[in-house]
Amino acid sequence: MALALACSIGLHWFFLQSLAWTTMLVDNLATTSLPAAFERTFDGKHPCPLCIAIAKGRSSEKKSNPLLPLKKIEGVTQAVVMVLSPPASFPPIARREAFVDALAHAPPTPPPRTV
């Protein structure tokens, strides 16, 4: 799932470009000094074949994902008014004392056993 998410947001291009730069830097260090190798690697004037392929892939990916055309959202044009009104009276609570009496008594001891 993480790999699919990374590819969907374009992290694969970042990893490929990092690999290309690392390879270019190692190749340039074999022939020049460190500052010259850094300059040649990151100046953009000397791309490697992998850098060229990455640039083509990025540009084709951007062109192949056109935005969907926006459509007008049609909805209700008139406002709907809802009025909530409480009842005139509430029904009486039946035998509240019976419920309170049931809570006041302790449970039977020992508890009944089922057979």
Image: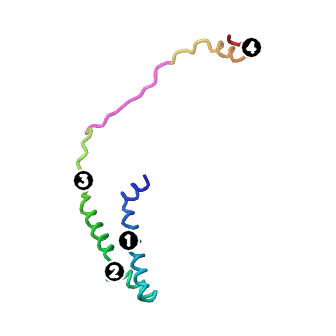
Distance, label 1 to label 4, CA atoms, is: 78 Å
In the rendered structure, are the residues bearing label 1 and label 2 in contact, judged by CB atoms less than 8 Å apart?
no
Q: Which mark is residue 17?
A: 1
Amino acid under disc 2: Gly
**Residue picked out by circle 3:** 68
Residues under labels 1 and 2: Cα distance? Answer: 12 Å
In primary-sequence order, the first of circles 1 and 4 is 1
Residue carrying label 4:
108
Relative depth, front residue between 23 and 45: 23
Per the image, the residue denoted by label 2 is 44
Choose between 92 and 69: the one closer to the eye. Answer: 69
User: In terms of image quadrants, where is residue 66?
Assistant: bottom left
Could you say whether the residue bearing mark 4 is in a helix, strand or loop? loop
Q: Label 1 sits on what residue type? A: Gln
Residue 65: percent from left, percent from top: 26, 58
Q: Earlier in the sequence, mark 3 or mark 4?
A: 3
Residues under numbered marks 4 and 2 in contact, where contact means CB atoms less than 8 Å apart: no
Tag in front: 1 or 2: 1
Is residue 62 left or right of 97 when viewed as pictured?
Answer: left
Q: Secondary structure at mark 1?
A: helix
Secondary structure under the numbered disc 3 in the rendered image: loop
Q: Amino acid at mark 4?
A: Pro
Which mark sits nearer the N-terminus, 1 or 2?
A: 1
Q: Nearer the viewer, mark 3 or mark 1?
A: 1
The quadrant in which residue 48 appears is bottom left
